[in-house]
Image (tube, rainbow, N blue to C red):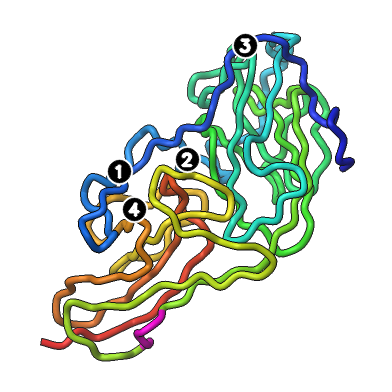
Amino acid sequence: MEDDPTRRTVLTTTGTVALASLAGCTADDDGDGNGDDSNSTDDSNSTDGDNATSDDNDNATDDESSLVDYDEDASVSFIEPTEGDTTVGGVYVSMAAENLDIEAVEEGVNDGAGHFHVLVDQEPVEEGEPIPSDDGYNHFGDGSLDSVLDLEPGEHDLVLQAGDGQHRALPVTDEVTITVEEASLEFVGIEDGETVSSPVSFDLEVEVDGADFEIERANQTHQNAGHHHVLVDHDPVEVGELIPSEDGYNHFGGGSSSIELELEPGDHDLVAQVGTGTHIATPLIAELSITVEE
């Protein structure tokens, strides 16, 4: 895709930009940098399991009605990433629309409305055609305005395209080309299989190639940035979904990389996972098992 100032299908001259919700848990710092119960994730975080290509995003339709009417000045755009970005630790995607209402598919098919899709290394879908539910076609049928994509290292072309409530393509797109570099998350100061006493203390460290990654406080949402979470006896959260604020999900929204946990005696599985400022799970994950002694 060409790096051209006119690359977007920008059809708008007026309208209100629908900006990504940056609501999330408050980054309270209780002295050790750890977030507390005020870090609860709520409905203002718009990304959830519906972002996956699922049965809710069933593109098949027997409805032969015409495509919805939409404003000729409608446009969509990537807020993040931007053209030429190098990303690590997952690609944070923030999307906006003008003169087009972004709503969940459960609202039905409505004129002047639709939802976002991000196509990875695919050409835009022709107007009126169903947007596939195949690899490379990411549906945000819940009306999400931001998410995280887990892409292989290398160069990727991303297309942001609006579709109606039946996932039929609108000719309203934006395009960027990015480079994805490798990154990993590591436990420091604790080993897999180790027997330890409570409180359990360790550090978390992000190793990256080709770009910097910043651990920052919650509610500060940027590309190549996020904050730590430690899951106790839970599986990693699927990339693009919200990390819960429930028992066993410890948020460190203060931006700390030095972790201390009070754990009951016994065997425990620990999962460290970085989330965005809006607590969306990224592919930066590390896992180990420990035994906490009496």
* Quadrant of the image occupied by residue 181: bottom right
Dot 2 or dot 1: first in sequence order is: 1
SS at badge 2: loop
Amino acid, disc 4:
Gly
Question: Which percent across, then down, holds residue 123?
Answer: 83, 40
SS at badge 1: loop
The quadrant in which the N terminus is found is top right
The residue shown at (27%, 54%) is 35
The residue shown at (77%, 41%) is 176
- Cα distance between the residues tagged 4 and 1: 7 Å
Q: Which residues are magenta?
A: 188-192
Q: Are marks 2 and 1 in contact (CB under 8 Å)?
A: no
Dot 3 or dot 4: first in sequence order is: 3
Dot 4 or dot 1: first in sequence order is: 1
Q: Which residue is labeled 1 in the image?
A: 26
- Cα distance between the residues tagged 3 and 4: 34 Å
Image check: 214 left or right of 165?
Answer: left
Q: Which mark is residue 253?
A: 4
Q: Which residue is labeled 2 in the image?
A: 47
